[in-house]
Amino acid sequence: MVILFLLFLIQFSVACACLGVNKEQQAQLAEQGWIHVDNDTLSQVQDSFRCCGFDDKVDKEVHHPTCEPQRCCVPPDTDNCQCPPCMEKLQNTINYAFKLCGWIGLFFSFTEIIGLLLARRYRNQSDPEDDKLATAVFPRHNFTY
């Protein structure tokens, strides 16, 4: 029961933190991730989301992989085409991930509370087979709990 309660506390705290993170904090966390990740991963993100760099502030401090292989524009509009920054494209995805993780965490933390309450309710319940054995061995004693 103690372990279930500790798991509940940790999971509930993390779920509330995920739901409480606003867009500015999400952008700061994404920026820190962008700064500390290797160039191969950055290339994959840029390829997947068809974007170039993180944003103007971070791109001045951190060199990102080249945007040459990116095809951000459809072929007729290839003149003066620039890829948008990745933060613009990632903002909705990051926000969705935080909210989804928060709600899933809340759901499972409350199922842990239900498990904790059920464990507390049934922890001292006696086994009927043990009662039969006790009355067979000691017939004159009443073993009621």
Image: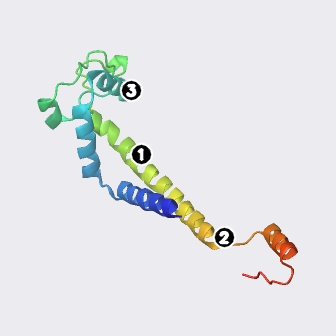
Residue 31's x, y, as percent?
23, 39
* Location of residue 32 with respect to 38 vertically, above or below: below
User: Mark 2 or mark 3, which has the lower sequence index?
Assistant: 3
* Location of residue 91 with respect to 106 vertically, above or below: above
The residue under label 1 is which amino acid type? Ala
User: Mark 1 or mark 3, which has the lower sequence index?
Assistant: 3
Gap between marks 2 and 3 measured at Cα: 52 Å
For discs 2 and 3, the disc positioned in front in the rendered view: 2
Q: Residue 70 occupies which quadrant of the picture?
A: top left
Q: Which residue is mark 2?
A: 122
Tell me the quadrant of the picture where the N terminus can be found. bottom right
Tell me the quadrant of the picture where the C terminus can be found. bottom right
For discs 1 and 2, the disc positioned in front in the rendered view: 2
Q: Which residue is mark 3?
A: 48
For discs 1 and 3, the disc positioned in front in the rendered view: 1
The residue under label 3 is which amino acid type? Ser
* Location of residue 135 with respect to 43 vertically, above or below: below
Q: Secondary structure at mark 2?
A: helix
Q: How is the image coloured?
A: rainbow
User: Mark 1 or mark 2, which has the lower sequence index?
Assistant: 1
The residue under label 2 is which amino acid type? Tyr
Which residue appears at 64% of the width and 69% of the height? 123
Q: Is residue 138 left or right of residue 37?
A: right
Gap between marks 1 and 2 measured at Cα: 37 Å
Q: Secondary structure at mark 3?
A: helix
Residue 95's x, y, as percent?
37, 48
Q: Which residue is mark 1?
A: 97
